[in-house]
Amino acid sequence: MNDSADALNTPRYDIPPELQQQVHLTTLERIYNWSRANSTWPMMFGLACCAIEMIATAAGRYDFSRFGMEVMRASPRQSDVMIVSGTVTKKMVPQIVRLYNQMSEPKYVIAMGACASGGGPFKEGYSVVAGVDKFLPVDVYIPGCPPTPQALLHGLMTLQRKISQEKLGEMRWYAKQPSEPIPVPLLGPDLIDPRKLPLIRKQAAHTGAEEEADE
Amino acid sequence: MSEHPLLDQQFPEWVQADARPGYGGWLVQAAHLNDVARWLRDQAGYDYLSSVTAVDYFPEDRMEVVYHLYRSTGGSALVLKVVTGREQAQVPSLTPLYPGAEFQEREVWDLLGVRFVGHPDLRRILLWEGFAGHPLRKDWREPFFEEEVKPFKSRWPEGHVRRAEDGNPYGDNLQYPPDFDPDSWQPQGEDALYAKFQRRADEGIHTDTMIVNLGPQHPSTHGVFRMVVQLEGETIVDLKPVMGYLHRNHEKIGERNTFLQNMPFTDRLDYTTSMANNFGYALAVEKLMGIQPPERAEYLRVMMAELTRIMTHLFSIGFLLNDLGAFFTPSLYAIQERELILDIFEAVSGSRMMCNYFRFGGVVRDLPEGVLEKVKELVLERLPRKIDEMDAYLTKNEIVRGRCEGVGVLTDAQAIALSASGPVLRASGVPYDVRRADPYSIYERFDFDVAVRYHGDIYDRYLLRLDEARQSLRILQQVLRDLPEGPVMNGKPQHLVRVPAGEAYGRVESPKGELGFYVVSNGKPNPLRYHVRAPSFINLTSLATMARGEKIADVVAVLGSIDIVLGEVDR
């Protein structure tokens, strides 16, 4: 990983040997990413079975506080990473999208386990969203049903690696325009994603025409 | 003579025995259900309505609502069935007689579309108001519908990769009724829910109550559960639980799966007690098949079920302290022991949480080398010490007592009427434990006491869990002493079992309460009906009774003391 202390302390400048213990040179991007990657606060937010493994990861044996992640915040405003730990259902997804919108930038999403990644064993179910990435931009997918704590730790470290490679110039929270919130889905006869409304209208017209043709 | 009254002699006009092969119980005329139930409750001692569900016999125009009644003094189930048509499906509600039927009847209405006449608050419970259709009806198809039953041809034997999304016009798990027009559609919202809160009549000074929502994302609700509370100042006037945020369609998927394919799904019901869930489902299907597991398998089953109980009870005590405000440190003590038990589960089944260890007629494999020594070390040395440690740290703690004693009280009569089970029922002074009341497997052989406490408050529920963990240790010590050698499975392992037509209800005392599986087979490789009587779900019926009159801060602890797991509440 290039965010280790060694990597930080190897700039491409010659520092006189007598100053090497006192002076450290690095780039703004590196120090910025290094500090962010090591203090990613997850949101205290459990959905299903995976949440129990997330709790186990937070507990003594696996202990993700070693990676600067022990501060789980119950408020989305205070958290950096949303660990979607379990099955996303149609009834719950409006709340999940709202929580994501409430998180302040920089924010990341981890899809923990098979259900959050793609619906998992419950994908065929009528009230299950086949993966949280239908609504949120997912940064890391963790396979498993549920993933073991080791797998979750690996996923979190993968996120740290991703963070440490981000470019200051491309970060969306420094863009000129603020990023748009994700439209919150509605609960109708089935889940209504506002982004799919044109398609729903087209389909409705289509089935209507078919019925008329039948008559 | 049967232990049950002969209802067809008592009510020859109204009741008939269910004489279909493989079936039992009584067919009651809908118009007289209330009279028969009242007689059963008041005269014959059947004061505990355990399970309410329905079966759709499409393409026949026939739906059956199935009731399982028990005596709170013990014994097996008395099964009532009421037949109704599919078009105008309606039966009288039993909620006025058995308040514990409230949520279960709402669930049957939600998923099967049977209207309960006389129900005080018949709304959808797992889905939302406005959802199109009643999904557990046999002619209702989900958007990702592929074939009627599994194994799907696309996966086996032909086996090719096809994304379910590609077959759907929306490229997603969505479908809308043909007359659906998104532009004129009005969201129904939650008016029906809020309308149920009674406004107080004016008494002189006009004051208003306040409605507060806790959840579905709230650290106190143990997952995605929501409580809507009506407050007067800080005091709770009324409370309505809202669930379904983790409704994962276990029953619909279960009716498409083969019998064996359901076993791993039971793991994911109450995901902290997968071994106990396996146990209940295996019992139900074994009842239908008429087989018995070999001796060693019976002992291994009991061993796993009791280890699960200790693990879950410690876990729930740890999280009760979380709810009281002692954030995470007490839980760390519990999780430490839990990890050691999970190590054993991982060694025997290959997975920490989703064990999938039981099979019809046994367990999937024997203990690997070295595991028995680990269990012995835990059961004989470590766990008794650790349970005592928990006891010493918490039981006399002033804050624990101050917050828990006399709070969230449920009396014995209320607990029975509200169909509470497990620790909630026993902490209210009802010594009802399925392992003793209606023994299954080999529990009759073991010497243990049914733990019971009498105050029905949070504190007693906590103490009862400690008592039960100690009793489980007693059982485990006897298991370790008597564990015989031999096979762990009868015959060869089969992936397609032959299950004769009929119905069966297998129930076990899971750590959360009475976990029942109602399985109906029509002789095909897939169950016709697969219903889970989930203790966490039904125990929630009594949440409002416990919470009324308490402070809002206490409702968090009350919920923690019921110990729900959302996977099971919402299924």
Image (tube, coloured by chain):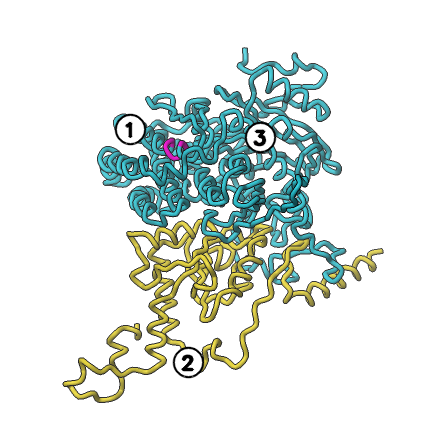
Disc marking residue B174: none
Part of the protein shown in magenta: B460-464
Give the letter of the chain under mark 3. Answer: B
Residue placed under numbered mark 3 in the picture? B501
Q: Which chain is cyan?
A: B
Q: Position of residue B168 (x, y in %)?
A: 63, 59
Give the letter of the chain under mark 1. Answer: B
Nearer-the-camera pick, B533 or B231: B231
Identified at 24% across, 76% down, the residue is A6
Q: Nearer the viewer, mark 1 or mark 3?
A: 1
Residue A3 counted in the magenta span? no
Indicate left or right for A8 with B78 as reference: left
Above/below status of A211 relative to B560? below
Q: Taking the image as drawn, is residue B287 in sight?
A: yes
Residue placed under numbered mark 2 in the picture? A168
Q: Which chain is yellow?
A: A
Indicate left or right for A14 with B438 as reference: left
Q: CA distance from mark 1 to mark 2?
A: 64 Å
* Secondary structure under the numbered disc 1 in the rendered image: loop
Q: Amino acid at mark 3?
A: Ala
Above/below status of B252 relative to A177? above
Specify few, some or many for label 3: CA neighbours under 10 Å numbering under 14, 14-19, or 20 or more: some
Nearer-the-camera pick, B514 or B283: B514
Q: Are marks 1 and 2 on the same chain?
A: no
Q: CA distance from mark 1 to mark 3?
A: 34 Å
Quadrant of the rendered image containing residue B563: top left
Specify few, some or many for label 1: CA neighbours under 10 Å numbering under 14, 14-19, or 20 or more: some
Is there a contact, CB below 8 Å, between mark 1 and mark 2? Answer: no
Disc marking residue B483: 1
